Amino acid sequence: MDLHRLILTFASVCWVSADISCNSTDRARAYVALFKHLDLSNNNSLTKNMRPVDEYNGYTWVSIDLGVTAITDVNENAQIITTQVQVETAWINKNIHWDHRNYCDIYTITTLKDGFWAPDIVVLER
């Protein structure tokens, strides 16, 4: 689906306060540097094709948020409603990591799903 977005969240062991205060320009540069560090500018086949787990017989917990963004049509006689939905998925990707202190305290990134492994999610309409 075009509306899928991948939100990568990474759990931190403890809270560390920032030693550096970053302005918006520093933060923008830190995002670019982080994408280069994670090799997201190139089509990295390892992050794209490998499921992000430590043990391959283990689980990957995926959080799914489905929201109705618009009602596009209502047919009262046939009792049919047509909607537009947005699906947001999130999971922890153990294949990539960074030290947030080196990147203006960036803990999470939002990016298109095309560069990463993504679970197969199908929405069946009835």
Image (cartoon, rainbow, N blue to C red):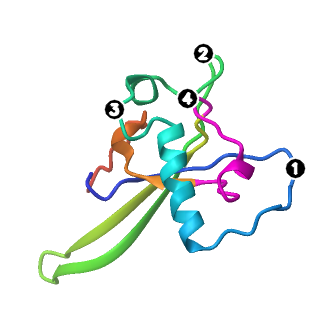
Whether 56 is drawn above or below 126: the answer is: above
Which numbered dot is residue 52? 4
Residue 58 is a magenta residue = no
Whether 74 is drawn above or below 15: the answer is: below
Mark-to-mark CA distance, 4 and 3: 16 Å
Dot 4 or dot 2: first in sequence order is 4
Q: Are marks 1 and 3 in contact (CB under 8 Å)?
A: no
Residue plotted at (61% across, 54% down): 108
Which numbered dot is residue 43? 3
Image side of residue 53 versus residue 1, left or right: right
Which numbered dot is residue 57? 2
Mark-to-mark CA distance, 2 and 1: 28 Å
Residue plotted at (59% across, 65% down): 26
Kind of element beneath mark 4: loop
Q: Nearer the viewer, mark 4 or mark 2?
A: 4
Secondary structure character of the magenta stretch overall: loop
Image side of residue 55 versus residue 62, left or right: right
Judging by the rendered image, the residue that carries numbered circle 1 is 14
* Magenta highlight range: 94-108
Q: Nearer the viewer, mark 1 or mark 3?
A: 3
Check disc 3 and give the amino acid type.
Asn
Residue plotted at (36% across, 72% down): 68
Q: Quadrant of residue 62?
A: top right
Mark-to-mark CA distance, 3 and 2: 26 Å
Whether 116 is drawn above or below 78: the answer is: above
Question: How many residues crowd around disc 4 within 10 Å: few (fewer than 14), some, or many (20 or more)?
Answer: many
The spot of residue 15 in percent (x, y) is 86, 56
**Residue in front for this viewpoint, 9 or 84:** 9
Check disc 2 and give the amino acid type.
Asn
Residue 106 is a magenta residue = yes
Dot 1 or dot 3: first in sequence order is 1
